[in-house]
Image (cartoon, rainbow, N blue to C red):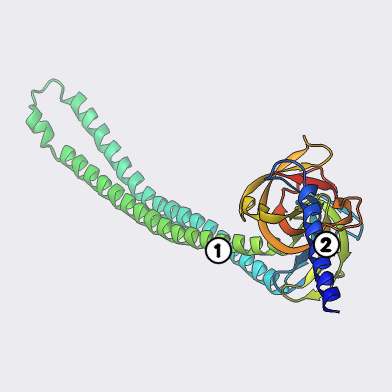
Amino acid sequence: MKLKSNWFYVLIIMMFGIMLYISAIYFKGSGESSIGIAQTSEYKINSEKAAQVKAIHVIPGMEVKAGQLLVELTSESLEMDILKLSNRIAVSKSELIEKSKLAESEIAYIKAQNQLVLEELESKIQELESEIQLNGALTKSLTITNSEVMNSPTVLKINSLNEQKKMHLDAMNIKISNVNQESKAEQQTLKSQIELLMLELSLLETEQKNLNKYAIASGVVNKVYVKPGEQVDSFTPLLEINPLHPTIVVAYLVGKKTVDFPVGKLVTVSSYDQRRNTVEGKVIGYGSVSELPEILQKSTATKAFGQELFIEIPDENTYFNGEKILIR
């Protein structure tokens, strides 16, 4: 009885050894190559925060492209904040225009106020200058020195009127300058406030836009979990998409091959039947030792086993789901 039991264990060990041998000789190529299966990995689109479903632009079975709008979401509180900010910006811009017009009106009033005085002074100066010219013509035959002319009461009066005119002009320009400076300061304050409000509005609009969900990669819509008008909580699944092309390759390693494929290593992934069809992949992790899929099994009664190796590949590839893949 004991002898039969020993033979049973020996038989088990021999069978296990044969399975490992078959698995080892199954993998073609160099010692650093392996085979696997290209697999698609569906992904779900979730809401990031509480929102209302505004519109759904896809249905199950529909093919979508990367970047395509799938679901429109809206937030009532967010829309109210955007509306309030938009109104504040509109009011501030109107106030900015009004302040500019007010400054122009004040300047026009100051000029009009001084214009009458300046015109009156200019008229008196012209009268006195005409009087000097007339007197000069009458006294042309008389000998009069320049000093006498310059010190004449008429000339002195003209000088006085010119001085008054200059003082009025200076005073007017000072008032206009003060109005301009005050108005510019107020307008600059308003402009700064408007810029801050517009920045805040831009952030809110970006947040609102980010509520909408777009396809991460080309694929086919598998399931839609929500309906238009439905209120959803944060992280609620909205829909599920199957990529058009595989994004993961599951390879199977035998023996010490695991040392040839450390996590993070870049590898060459190619179609087993069309070796020129290659992409670059990246080792992202290991799984358990399991039986190879049927497509990788040899036509023998003994099943082959290997350790699962997960390789990430770009979604822009021409492989199909379940295709036999060579990894080097």
| Mark 1 vs 2, N-terminal side | 2
Give the position of the N terminus as an image quadrant. Answer: bottom right
Of all residues, the one furthest to the top in this rendering is 141
Does the image show residue 68? no
Q: Position of residue 245 (x, y in %)?
A: 81, 49
Q: Which residue is mark 1?
A: 197
Residue at the image position 85 percent from the left and 57 percent from the top? 293
Give the position of the C terminus as an image quadrant. Answer: top right
Residue at the image position 52 percent from the left and 62 percent from the top? 196
Nearer to the camera, 18 or 242: 18
Q: At label 2, which amino acid type do we have? A: Met
Q: Residue 185's image quarter?
A: bottom left
What is the number of the mark on residue 33?
none
Q: Is residue 118 placed above or below 138 in the rendered structure?
A: below
Q: Position of residue 308 (x, y in %)?
A: 74, 59
What's the CA distance linking mark 1 and mark 2? Answer: 76 Å
Element class at badge 1: helix
Q: Position of residue 190 (x, y in %)?
A: 48, 61
Nearer to the camera, 46 or 253: 253
Element class at badge 2: helix
Q: Is residue 109 placed above or below 161 in the rendered structure?
A: below
Q: Is residue 48 placed above or below 180 in the rendered structure?
A: below
Residue at the image position 18 percent from the left and 39 percent from the top? 154
Q: Is residue 200 left or right of residue 33?
A: left
Q: Is residue 167 placed above or below 148 in the rendered structure?
A: below
Q: Is residue 102 left or right of residue 310?
A: left
Q: At label 1, which amino acid type do we have? A: Leu
Q: Residues within 10 Å of mark 1 (few under 14, many from 20)?
A: some
Q: Residues within 10 Å of mark 2 (few under 14, many from 20)?
A: few
Q: Is residue 100 left or right of residue 275?
A: left
Q: Position of residue 289 (x, y in %)?
A: 75, 63
Q: Which residue is mark 2?
A: 15
